[in-house]
Image: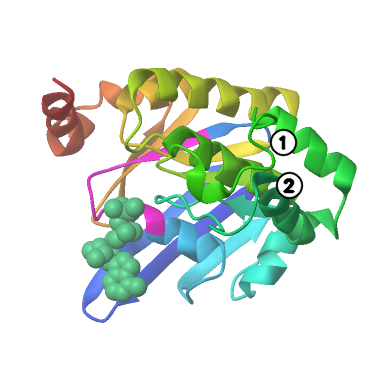
Amino acid sequence: MLKAFNVTKRFGALTAVDELSFEVQKGQIFGIAGPNGAGKSTVYNLITGFYSYEGKIEFDGRDITGKPPYRIAKAGIARTFQIPQTFPSLSVQKSISVGCRFGAAGGLDPTHVEEMIRFVDLEKERFQNTALLNLLGKKKLMIGAALATKPKILMLDEPMAGCNPMEIKSLMDLIGRINRDLGITIIIIEHFMKVLTELTEILLIIESGRMICCDEPVKVVNDPRVIESYLGDVNAESK
Ligand SMILES: Nc1ncnc2c1ncn2[C@@H]1O[C@H](COP(=O)(O)OP(=O)(O)O)[C@@H](O)[C@H]1O
Ligand SMILES: [Mg+2]
């Protein structure tokens, strides 16, 4: 469904993404992990058309290389950000409606907005100002607004960052339902290896913009190259 061919992004002397190739299959939950500064968020910025790059990206059999962000959103790619981005002066309902006007949805669809408010479990907060939501609420809102665009693929950037174990469980459940019940393909960047091994079918590990390995999570976490470059570090952090 999404294919990257030798994608390279340079910021001056820094090569943030280096000859990266991978393929995400339709219906998959595809994970991306790697140390801070590995180039994970930059990969999202390239897929969504925020920066130019070398190489090629195909989505749904079409070449989307060099297309502007609104065209890529219209094609059915939605994303969330590492730091929740909300419209502080809008209600939950309005914010999700804004999402619905963009992307593949093709205009406001109140029924769909209603369904997505329910899907992310923000019915009680629907008329609340988004600034008043707690962290989990803001994260659910950002996901709800992305879902309102009716995407084919949803890209989540560290959705569990800053969350406690209960919030993590709630988001994992939501992500599973998005994939299963809405049939949306998911790419997830995450720091918590446990989340990735439980949720994903394929896990891509990158370091300094380069692929270390890309395989089933059980194989990835036992790969000596991954243990050396990344996992040792993460395991130490989570203790
Ligand atoms: N717009 C930019 N201009 C210059 N350097 C950038 C820019 N965006 C990211 N970088 C650099 O690219 C590298 C990868 O960053 P990023 O993709 O955010 O890493 P990750 O998400 O894996 O932590 C980092 O060294 C970062 O400083
Ligand atoms: Mg990042």
Query: Which residue sits at x=37%, y=61%?
Result: 19
| Residue at left offset 70%, top offset 55% | 99
Across and down, in percent, residue 87 comes to 56, 59
The residue closer to the viewer here, 96 or 215, is: 96
Instruction: Give x and y (percent) for residue 131.
Output: 50, 50
User: Callout 2, which amino acid?
Assistant: Ala
Residue neighbourhood size for the residue with mark 2, other residues' Cα within 10 Å, grouped as few (<14), some (14–19), many (≥20): many
Residue drawn at x 70%, y 49% as measured from the top left: 96
Residue closest to the eye, 94 or 183:
94
- Pointer 1: what residue? 117
Locate residue 51, reporting x and y percent: 47, 74
186 to the left or right of 195: right
Q: Quadrant of the C terminus?
A: top left
Quadrant in which ligand 1 is drawn: bottom left
Residue carrying label 2 = 148
Query: 22 or 128, which lies in front?
Result: 128
- In the picture shown, does residue 173 fall above or below 231? above
Q: Residue at x 64, y 48 (%)?
A: 146
- Report whether residue 61 is seen: no
Which of 92 and 34 lies nearest the eye of the viewer?
92
Q: Which residues are magenta?
A: 30-41
Residue 200 lies left or right of residue 95; in this view the side is left
- Foreground disc of the pair 1, 2: 1
